[in-house]
Image (cartoon, rainbow, N blue to C red):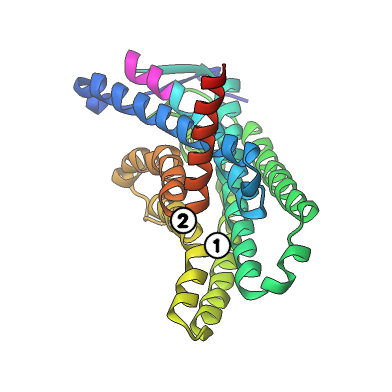
Amino acid sequence: MCEVNQTQVTQIRLLGFRGLAKFKSLLFIVFLVTYLIILGGNLLIIILVTSVDHLKIPMFFFLKHLATADVLLTTSVIPMMLGIIFIDEGRLSFVGCITQLYAFGIFGFVQCFLIAVMSYDRYLAVCKPLHYASLMNSHVCLRLVLGSWLLVTLVTSYEIMGVVQFNFCGINYIDNFFCDFGPVVELSTSDTSSFMLQDFVLSIFVIFCPFTFIFITYMYIFFIILKISSAYGRGKAFSTCSSHLATVCVYYGTLITVYMVPVDDSTAIMNKYRSLLYTVVTPLLNPIIYSLRNQEIKKALQKFVTKLKTDRFQF
């Protein structure tokens, strides 16, 4: 309960990019174009994997879900961010803020597990090629993906249930462009020390356990590649992992940049801008990485465009 001289927070103010108000027209255009590119690139991957037969393999099945998470993540943040840039400040109900935090947590952290699942797929493809088809069949792929979504949803739900039990009294503004976890918890007037310790433990499970699994699988992959006698064979084996490895570097590079930097007053402000890395940059780079570095995607895109032209000509 709030004290007598305090009022319960029912509305959250998002201060956005107040220090860059004179550049708001440029920011609005840049982020709008970026958002459209993110939607276009990731939706194209989803359409290609769904419609082109030779892309209906485990690696691209996982990629489709990664692209889906990217679309949902950016859609939960960027449209509101564009509104904040346009009117200099955002306002949403406390329930709306918690809802955004919940969606952001699910769509952001599920990528940790999807990327880990993709590394397991690459491990089987390189290290156990003779057993790959039986070990990574359609039923296993579906269970891995559904398990990733379900596990992250349960963990995020548990976290959100803890947040809503806090008292939020008096101050109702956040110096950010969306309801991120850290700023929302800092807004609470309750004692959050035990909750933050609990959150740290869960973060290890959600972020660092998948990363450790990815690291171990790639150690095995590299040892197997080094044992291949021919340079052509080593290059071919490495090419099957290069796109995914680039995605791992981009995703975990952004998380480390934001969350592993020691926090003080200046870094707390800078984290607002660093958070653009995983809300904007990573979803933008993922389809680019797979489009430029993956021959199957290029061939599927060419085939898809040719089919569209043929259908249009026949019509």
Residue visible at 41% across and 45% down in the picture: 288
Q: Position of residue 78 (x, y in %)?
A: 44, 27
Q: Which residue lies at the image location 24% right of the left edge and 27% below the top edge?
A: 19
* Residue 261 vertical placement versus 189 (above, below): below
Residue ID at (66%, 68%): 124
- Front position in the image: 100 or 168: 100
Q: How crowded is mark 1: few (under 14 residues within 10 Å), some or many (20 or more)?
A: many
- Looking at this rendering, what residue extends furthest in the front direction? 314
Q: Taking 169 as reference, is 151 left or right? A: right
Mark number, residue 304: none
Residue farthest along the left direction in this orientation = 22
**Can residue 261 be seen at all in this image of the molecule?**
yes
Would you name the residue on which mark 2 appears?
Answer: 252
**Residue position for label 1:** 211
Magenta-colored span: 80-88
Residue type marked 2: Tyr
Q: Which element type, helix, strand or loop, lies under badge 1?
A: helix
Inspect the magenta stretch and tell me whether residue 82 lies in it.
Answer: yes
Give yes or no for contact between labels 2 and 1 (Cβ–Cβ under 8 Å).
yes
Q: Distance between the residues labelled 2 and 1?
A: 8 Å
Q: In this view, does 210 lie above or below 306?
A: below
Q: Main secondary structure of the magenta part?
A: helix
Task: Classify 72 as above or below 82.
Answer: below
Amino acid type, label 1: Phe
Looking at the image, how many numbered discs can be counted on the residues?
2
Under tag 2, what secondary structure?
Answer: helix
Name of the residue lying farthest toward the top:
87
Q: Quadrant of residue 149?
A: top right
State the image coordinates of residue 127 (x, y, percent, origin top left). 63, 75
